[in-house]
Amino acid sequence: MEHSKDFEKKIERKMEHYVKKVVKIIAMVIFGIAVFLLANYVLMWLWNWLMPDLFGLSTITYWQALGIFVIAKLLFGFGGGGSGKNSGKSRHKKKFKATHRCSTMRRDFEEWKHYEQFWKEEGEEAYKNYVERIKNDNHDTE
């Protein structure tokens, strides 16, 4: 007798667990539909508030807003890219250490610390000579 009561309680707990899961799933589906319909209403409201004044477009109905919403989702994606650990994009990216990535740029930048001094001493005169040479070359070819 005691074994059958334990078995009944175990089955009852399992059924409660499954019923709770089903109720949660149904609630989430209803919540998702409500959010979708609300987002569609917000889209319609924003369109009718902004577009006629800004661009001279006509106002739209709820169903037209739904069509715009669906087209926008099809064209621009449904989101969900995410930046989580299991994101597909992050798996394919190569990861470099900052020292490897920037070493050539740092090395090149080290040479630029002398630029200002060079310009003061030789640069302006060298630039003027370069411009004169270009002008003379252009007159020869024309």
Image (cartoon, rainbow, N blue to C red):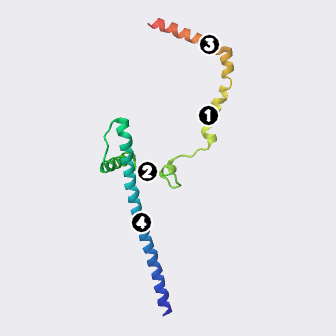
**Circle 4 is placed at which residue position?**
27
Q: Choose top left, top right, bottom left or bottom right for residue 142.
A: top left
Mark 2 surroundings within 10 Å by alpha-carbon count, few (fewer than 14), some (14 through 19), many (20 or more): few
Dot in front, 4 or 2: 4
In the image, which disc is placed on residue 48? none
Q: Choose top left, top right, bottom left or bottom right for residue 126.
A: top right
Q: Secondary structure at mark 1?
A: helix
Q: Secondary structure at mark 4?
A: helix
Earlier residue among tags 4 and 3: 4
Amino acid identity at mark 2: Gly
Earlier residue among tags 1 and 3: 1
Q: Are marks 4 and 3 in contact (CB under 8 Å)?
A: no
Q: Are marks 1 and 3 in contact (CB under 8 Å)?
A: no
Distance of label 1 from label 4 (alpha carbons): 56 Å
Earlier residue among tags 1 and 2: 2
Amino acid identity at mark 3: Ala
Distance of label 3 from label 2 (alpha carbons): 55 Å
Tell me what residue is drawn at x 50 percent, y 48 percent.
Answer: 92
Dot in front, 3 or 2: 2
Distance of label 1 from label 2 (alpha carbons): 37 Å
Tell me what residue is drawn at x 68 percent, y 16 percent.
Answer: 120
Q: Where 21 falls versus 35 (above or below)?
A: below
